[in-house]
Amino acid sequence: MMQLGVIGLGTMGANLARNAARNGAQVVLFNRTKDKTRAFMKQFGTEGDFVPAETLRQFLSALGAPRVILLMVKAGEAVDAVIEESLPSLRKGDILIDAGNSHYRDTERREAHLLRQGVHFIGMGVSGGEEGALRGPSMMPGGDPAAVKKLLPLLRKMSAADGAGGACVTHVGPGGAGHFVKMIHNGIEYAVMQLIAESYDLLKSLGGLTNKDLAKTFAAWSRSDDLGSYLTEITARIFTVKDPGTRKDLIDLIDDAAGQKGTGRWTTEAAMELGMAIPSINAAVDARLFSGEKEYRTKAGKNMPTSLLPLRRIAPGIVRSALELSVICAYAEGFELMAKMAAKKQWNLDLAEIARIWRGGCIIRSRFLVTLQKALTGSSAAKKAILMRLSGVRQRQWRQAIAAGIARGVPMPALSASLWFYDSLRRDRLPQNLIQAQRDFFGAHTYRRTDRAGDFHTVWNR
Ligand code: 6PG
């Protein structure tokens, strides 16, 4: 039987602890405020083999060597605080798993720090929210391969099924790779959520759909092969929920300023540092930030003149194509960013394997990931299937939806960013030849030519 220590009994930590116990582990529990541990034991104590500890010292001595400790505390200083406090008592071979949404750079720093004492630090991305933590999340452990190997038997039991006989967990890569991959997951999550939100806006504002219609539409989409996903499923549910107090549709009573904890922004920052464009993800991050600037936008927006183009109602099928194709772009951007980072860090990420462990448990789980996994494994049929979806009538409807939004002044940052990403890929010549000429004109920055090798400079203003 495996023993697992869990530090941090917030909802995620408590549910992971229960999940581990359900899967046969003895779980030693510790939380900084004792009340939480007591409440946990009162509520779930009989569910499995739990050993509550009131002090960190008690906790550490209840764990047999080598200790395996899962940390589920708030990302940032709290993680460092727990590390510093436990480090003097940790021994060579102990494994400390950080299962929170930590920045991959912090993970790299902590790994190096703990390794000096022979302690393995595993940065593990965990996705699936509260429900997933309990019933089966997708888990992305990164760090020392031998240490991760020791954890895999339990993690396999705890994680979601991938729908093809496997478990949604794998050793992602060394160092901060696990947390980096989780960060990209969240970047894609931001983009898909924003794309769904913009589709909702188009369907409501230009399609005339009521909340009841929206629930039906998203439910139908979530059952389809090309749009079936956890996020479309929960979206359909959201439109059916009433506010118990007013009996109004709850969605209409929710403030339109969205919060964020930072993983989306980190994805944007990582891409910027690598000099890489991820337009759909960036647009989603921007859109969230903008939504939060409520005072500014309501004040400044008051006197903005409106002058729109005429347009008839748009059909849901048009929006459906726009959503479907834009989501493909968001995935493409996220996976390309992983490939670039892997090359830079020499991480040797197996992108097909990452698509596989996202097929179940995580927030962006979707049927598209099945095709994407196959395409990344090298299946030409799967690659062709994706290209087919991007072609013909669906691509025209994608353009139509965005044209409609533009005509009627409905902001669609992520939908239109996805389309520009696609069109920029598709075009063999972009207008940046002119940028190069301008740079050379005012700053003698030189340019390269299409017909000859070398760097050239022209005296433009002769
Ligand atoms: C997941 C989620 C999870 C969490 C995010 C939300 O994969 O389970 O991504 O990690 O819900 O932290 O992030 P924001 O607060 O930034 O939206």
Image (cartoon, rainbow, N blue to C red):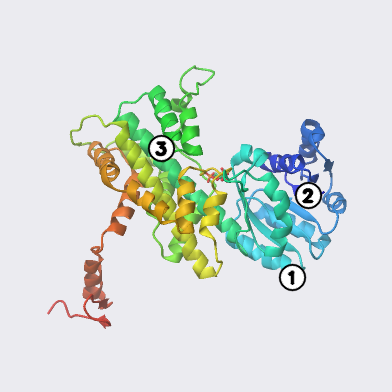
User: Gap in Å between the C-alphas at discs 1 and 3?
Assistant: 47 Å
Label 3 packing within 10 angstroms: few (<14), some (14-19), many (20+): some
Taking the spot 54% from the left edge, 48% from the top edge, the residue there is 358
In the rendered image of this protein, does residue 235 appear above or below residue 111? above
Cα–Cα gap, marks 3 and 2: 40 Å
Amino acid on which the number 3 mark rests in the picture: Ala
Q: Residue at x 72, y 45 (%)?
A: 8
Amino acid carrying label 2: it is: Gly
Q: In what element is the residue under mark 1?
A: loop
Crowd tier of the residue under label 1, counting other residues whose Cα lies within 10 Å: few below 14, some 14–19, many 20 or above = few
**413 left or right of 100 in image:** left
SS class of the residue under badge 2?
Answer: strand
In front: label 1 or label 2:
2
- Kindly indicate the quadrant of the structure image that contains residue 319: top left
Q: Secondary structure at mark 3?
A: helix
**Label 2: which residue?**
5
- Residue matched to label 3: 197
The percent coordinates of residue 130 (x first, y second) are 63, 38
Furthest toward the left, the residue is: 462
Q: Is residue 81 visible?
A: no
Q: Relative to 143, does residue 27 appear above or below in the rendering? A: above
Task: Give the labeled residue for mark 1.
Answer: 116
